[in-house]
Image (cartoon, rainbow, N blue to C red):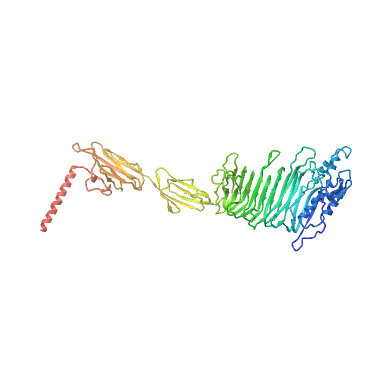
């Protein structure tokens, strides 16, 4: 019989099993659990004894339970074939004896679909089409309550008539365990940890729950050892005479909770089309050294989101290790997002974030601290198709590290080849101590690290020396901390490097300076020489050749002079540069740090005199003799009259000296 419109409206708002004026948690810290059930108005008005069944359920659930286990057990029995509810109605599948108030005899429902029993609408289909019995159930935690035992919400261990048909043919797709107020806590055994799960989707063909969500919110789990296991799963379609296969969408949401041991999530659900885990706004406060990770995810999974959480006090941080499965021949590729967390740990050989498996992995917006190890650690065999690491604030001994691995399970290689794992490193911020360029980032052409502290290599070079890589406008080369940098010094034609100093220490006339693992600024000072030109000015009467048309200061330059027939060398000078004459008649000088011009003069000789000869070495003009060079006192020409006059002058000087000597006697 159909219910009135007013009753339906009231049911749409929510029909609950809570007692009015429920007492608060006790002052001594103990508490209790209440359960709120929301029914579907379509079912409530369907005529399947909804009024009587809801009233019977209320009698079971309208109480304060001393543990979560007790509350879940009472709820689960609402759907079982054993209980206190009975109905003699044989017309619509309601006939049950001593069953749970929300239990339906599936066998009877299936038998009522013929023309003589209610028309052409299958009762099972009708019941399922009207959205089942319960749309949502909320277990409310007041104060501190014990878990009381391993809990699976929605579990139905008892079968109908031995036919293997779950008696709860109508899945509840919104299951919640929620803390009331700021002091909601669940305690466990203290050693083994706690297990809390729910079945939230799937079931039969007509009552199939396409999507189910299990939410745990605003609760502190007080155990400090072992693991707190929270998960949800669905089921595939239970055979109801068809070959149809369906796969459910299942999600576990853990929000605003506090954990002191390891949050462990393992789901053996290899049939769900989507199996997602979302952990947000939680606090992980470790303390017991036997608890390694704050969060450890394993099992069949398509999505993991770990966002907005705070992790501290654990030797390691988090480890994501979803299994990649297939269903109906389609690959289940896990997508992992680790974002906007604060993760702090201290472990020399593991990372604050351990990436073990995945398909598309994003690590972004996190503050990551590891006192002695890496921020990110890749487990051997990690084979995600793509990994993006960007916009993180990192303070760790190393940015990224690889496991040593084994021959069977080698360390991951990011080589940029098609089909190989791809690593993209965006803009991150690093502390001064973090070694950025560690395997596998080093030598990875696809990894572009930005956002790291940058140090300046100041390079001071004179004209004629260029630097590779090129200098910025301020004369520096910026180097990301932890990187290697080679500075090449290239001398232009006509220049040479004479010395290179690095931070004030001479390295000699080197052309390259290598810096490794740069962690501070450095200064490079270069001194260099420019070659100077050697030119010749000469008159006719001979040829002059030099060993070099340009030379560096200090180098020896040789000069070869040859008079033509009928001429001889008169003079040769090089300004302020002193020339020396060799035994072979050549001349030489040491190149100064200026250009040098050689001036050479030849003169014609009489037919009686030998020609084509150069003057003896004593006739080389030296700087300062007559304004053109230092002389030897000999005339600068070969005129015979001048020579005779000079000889007579010398004889007169000798005679004068002799007369003076005789007078003294």
Query: Residue 275's spot in the image, x, y percent?
Result: 71, 45
Left or right: 520 with respect to 541? right
- Quadrant in the picture for residue 126: top right
Query: Residue 62's spot in the image, x, y percent?
Result: 82, 55
Quarter holding the C terminus? bottom left
Query: Residue 421's spot in the image, x, y percent?
Result: 60, 42
Of 224 and 611, the residue lying toward us: 224
Residue pushed farthest bottom?
28
Query: Residue 44's spot in the image, x, y percent?
Result: 84, 47
Residue 244 seen in the figure: yes
Of 98 and 508, the residue lying toward us: 98
Quarter holding the N terminus? top right
Count of marks overlaid on the render: 0
Of 30 and 466, the residue lying toward us: 30
Left or right: 417 with respect to 487? right
Of 7 and 464, the residue lying toward us: 7
Residue 6 seen in the figure: no
- Quadrant in the picture for residue 446: top right
């Amino acid at each position: 019989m159909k219910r009135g419109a007013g009753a339906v409206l009231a049911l749409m708002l929510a029909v609950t099993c809570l007692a009015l004026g429920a007492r608060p948690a006790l002052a001594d810290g103990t508490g209790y659990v209440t359960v709120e059930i929301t029914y579907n108005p379509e079912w409530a008005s369907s005529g399947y004894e909804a009024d009587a069944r809801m009233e019977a359920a209320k009698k079971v659930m309208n109480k304060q339970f001393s543990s979560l286990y007790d509350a879940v057990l009472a709820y689960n029995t609402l759907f079982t074939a054993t209980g206190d509810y009975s109905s003699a109605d044989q017309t619509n599948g309601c006939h049950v004896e001593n069953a749970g108030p929300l239990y339906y005899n599936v066998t009877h429902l299936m038998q009522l679909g013929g023309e003589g029993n209610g028309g052409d609408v299958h009762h099972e289909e009708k019941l399922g089409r009207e959205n089942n019995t319960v749309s949502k159930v909320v277990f409310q935690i007041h104060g501190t309550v014990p878990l009381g035992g391993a809990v699976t919400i929605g579990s139905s261990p008892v079968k109908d008539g031995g036919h293997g048909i779950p008696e709860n043919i109508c899945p509840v797709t919104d299951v919640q365990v929620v803390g009331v107020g700021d002091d909601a806590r669940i305690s466990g055994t203290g050693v083994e940890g706690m297990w809390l799960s729910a079945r939230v989707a799937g079931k039969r063909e007509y009552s199939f729950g396409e999507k189910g969500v299990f939410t745990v919110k605003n609760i502190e789990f007080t155990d400090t050892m072992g693991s707190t296991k929270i998960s949800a799963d669905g089921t595939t379609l239970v055979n109801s005479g068809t070959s149809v296969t369906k796969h459910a969408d299942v999600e576990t949401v853990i929000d605003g909770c506090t954990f002191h041991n390891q949050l462990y999530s393992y789901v053996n659900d290899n049939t769900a089309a989507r199996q997602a885990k979302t952990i947000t706004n939680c606090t992980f406060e470790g303390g017991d050294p036997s608890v390694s990770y704050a969060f450890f995810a394993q099992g069949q999974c398509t999505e993991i989101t770990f966002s907005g959480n705070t992790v501290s006090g654990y030797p390691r941080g988090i480890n994501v290790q979803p299994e990649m499965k297939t269903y109906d021949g389609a690959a289940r590729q896990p997508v992992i997002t680790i974002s906007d967390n604060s993760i702090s740990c201290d472990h020399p050989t593991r990372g604050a974030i351990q990436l073990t498996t995945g398909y598309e992995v994003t690590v972004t917006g996190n503050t990551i601290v590891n006192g002695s190890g890496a921020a990110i650690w890749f487990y051997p065999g990690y084979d995600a198709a793509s990994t993006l690491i960007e916009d993180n604030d990192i303070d760790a001994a190393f940015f990224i590290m690889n496991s040593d691995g084994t021959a069977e399970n080698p360390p991951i290689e990011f080589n940029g080849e098609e089909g190989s794992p791809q690593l993209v490193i965006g803009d991150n911020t690093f502390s001064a101590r973090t070694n950025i360029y560690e395997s596998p980032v080093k030598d990875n052409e696809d990894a572009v690290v930005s956002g790291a502290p940058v140090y300046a290599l100041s390079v001071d070079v004179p004209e004629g020396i260029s630097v590779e890589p090129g200098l910025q406008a301020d004369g520096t080369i910026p180097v990301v901390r932890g990187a290697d940098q080679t500075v090449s010094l290239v001398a232009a034609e006509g220049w040479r490097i004479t010395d290179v100093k690095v931070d004030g220490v001479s390295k000699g006339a080197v052309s390259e300076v290598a810096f490794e693992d740069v962690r501070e600024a450095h200064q490079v000072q270069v001194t260099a020489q420019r070659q100077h030109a050697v030119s010749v000015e000469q008159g006719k009467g001979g040829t002059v050749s030099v060993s070099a048309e340009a030379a560096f200061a200090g180098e020896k330059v040789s000069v070869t002079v040859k008079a033509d027939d009928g001429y001889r060398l008169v003079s040769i000078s090089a300004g302020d540069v002193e020339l020396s004459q060799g035994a072979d008649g050549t001349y030489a000088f040491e190149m100064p740090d200026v250009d040098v011009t050689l001036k050479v003069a030849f003169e014609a000789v009489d037919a009686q005199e030998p020609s084509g000869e150069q003057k003896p070495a004593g006739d080389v003009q030296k700087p300062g003799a007559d304004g053109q060079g230092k002389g030897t006192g000999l005339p600068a020409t070969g005129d015979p009259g001048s020579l005779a006059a000079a000889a007579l002058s010398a004889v007169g000087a000798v005679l004068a000296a002799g007369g003076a000597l005789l007078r003294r006697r």
